[in-house]
Image: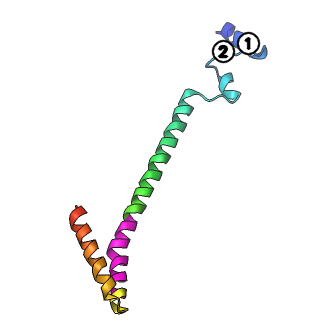
Amino acid sequence: MAGILREREFLFAAGIRKPGTFADRAEGGMCMLEVLFAIGLIWLLWKLIVLAVKAAWGITKVLVFIIFLPLILIGLVIGGLVYIAIPILIVVGIVGLLFGK
């Protein structure tokens, strides 16, 4: 055992290092586990960004079709623009019937 330690000390002092030893990582090299961990974190971050965009799009659709569109139509009727509100209501109703789930 002492011979192996002396050989490593000699190689380290001579600037020759064996692959896979602590000296490799001490000089700034990344081991394979660290690379896999970094790739996994990047993949997880991407999945979370995609999930956030999908959730934001879903919330936006709900807000527009359940809250803002009826308010706009009510505002048009109150403002005396029934001739604009009725066609919008008809088009939205047809699209809802054709493409609704």
The C terminus sits in image quarter: bottom left
Q: Main secondary structure of the magenta part?
A: helix
**In magenta segment, residue 63:** yes
Name which residue lies at 27% across and 73% down.
91
- Which residue is label 1 attached to? 11
Give the structural element (helix, strand or loop) at label 1: helix
Q: Please report contact status of discs 1 and 2: CB closer than 8 Å, yes or no.
A: yes
The percent coordinates of residue 11 (x first, y second) are: 73, 12
* Spatial CA span between label 1 and label 2: 8 Å
Give the structural element (helix, strand or loop) at label 2: loop
**In magenta segment, residue 82:** no
- Which residue is label 2 attached to? 18
Three-letter code for the amino acid on which mark 1 is drawn: Leu
Name which residue lies at 26% across and 67% down.
95
100 over 16 or under it: above or below? below
83 over 29 or under it: above or below? below
The percent coordinates of residue 12 (x first, y second) are: 74, 16
Using the rendered view, name the quadrant where residue 63 is placed: bottom left
Three-letter code for the amino acid on which mark 2 is drawn: Lys
The percent coordinates of residue 72 (x first, y second) are: 37, 82
Name which residue lies at 49% across and 38% down.
40
Total numbered labels placed on residues in the image: 2
Q: Is residue 38 or residue 5 the one in the foreground?
A: 38
Q: Which residues are magenta?
A: 59-75
Q: Earlier in the sequence, mark 1 or mark 2?
A: 1
Q: Is residue 24 or residue 58 the one in the foreground?
A: 58
